[in-house]
Amino acid sequence: MSKILIVDDDRNICDIIRLYLEKDGFSVVMAHDGVEGLHLFREQSPALVILDIMLPQMDGLSVCREIKKISDIPIIMLTAKGETFDKILGLELGANDYVVKPFEAKELVARVKVVLRRYDHNKPSSERELVFPNLHINLSQYTLKVNGKSVDIPPKELELLYYLASNPNRVYTRDQLLEAVWGFDYFGDSRTVDVHINRLREKLVLDDQKWQLKTVWGVGYKFEVK
């Protein structure tokens, strides 16, 4: 479960963002000034920071600058309408994206997912490998080994397997998998997920498996580790 840090002095905005993020399976920590935000970043090690520019104690641009001195964790800046200079400066300081207030919470969550996917794809190959008994997934080289043997696999099938296996024993709905693997702007049928899961199962047959792609009836799928 990815942890998101929200730093905004507007508590109502924080609560709304938190509700939407938690609905999509993220865990959330919140701070309401820049100093507290920087402290929580160092203490909690979040996967991504949502950072308002206008903050008490320490402004968001200063917080962004301090974070980027010690980490490459992605940052999405929140900026008021018309703050063009701040947006440009934020991106120059290393922010990965920005969202202009007022915004739709669903759009912000979608941007969080896109930025996290982009960040994950830019990681070194050693950080994009998953190893389980008789299973080796390498998303950097797009290779799959089952029981020590290389298996030919289409990119989307491997991305789906990698995403599920990155979060073992967590259940995802079809819509969540479509957003995460195919993108939030994908307009295909959710049965696409079912087709890809079935094809993956044909490739992952072993006599004694310590893991499996399991259907959770009425909900979706999970990569179950026994």
Image (cartoon, rainbow, N blue to C red):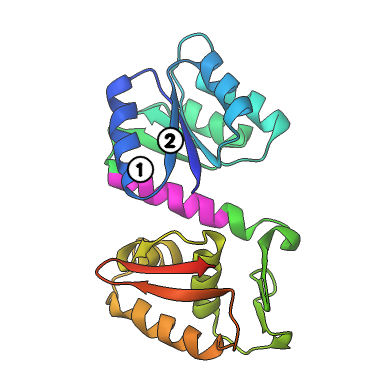
Q: Of helix, strand and loop, which one carries label 2?
A: strand
Q: Residue at x 55, y 79 (%)?
A: 155
The disc placed on residue 28 is 2
Name the foreground residue: 101 vs 2: 2
N-terminal-most mark, 1 or 2: 1
Which quadrant, please, contains the C terminus?
A: bottom right
- Residue wearing tag 1: 22
The amino acid marked with disc number 2 is Val
Assess whether residue 108 is covered by the magenta stretch: yes
Mark 2, other Cα within 10 Å: few <14 / some 14–19 / many ≥20: some
Instruction: Look at the magenta stretch and give its main secondary structure.
Output: helix
Q: Of helix, strand and loop, which one carries label 1?
A: helix
| Residue 153 occupies quadrant | bottom right
Name the foreground residue: 53 vs 73: 73
Query: Relative to 30, is 98 above or below?
Result: below
> Is mark 1 in CB contact (under 8 Å) with mark 2?
yes
Q: Is residue 102 left or right of residue 111?
A: left
Query: Relative to 209, is 34 above or below?
Result: above
**How much space separates mark 1 and mark 2, taking CA atoms?**
7 Å
Residue 194, given in percent of the width and then of the height, sits at 35, 80
Part of the protein shown in magenta? 106-118
Mark 1, other Cα within 10 Å: few <14 / some 14–19 / many ≥20: few
Q: Is residue 81 visible?
A: no
Q: Residue at x 30, y 42 (%)?
A: 20
Q: Is residue 19 left or right of residue 210?
A: left
Residue 88, given in percent of the width and then of the height, sits at 53, 33
Residue 158, given in percent of the width and then of the height, sits at 55, 76
| Residue 225 occupies quadrant | bottom right
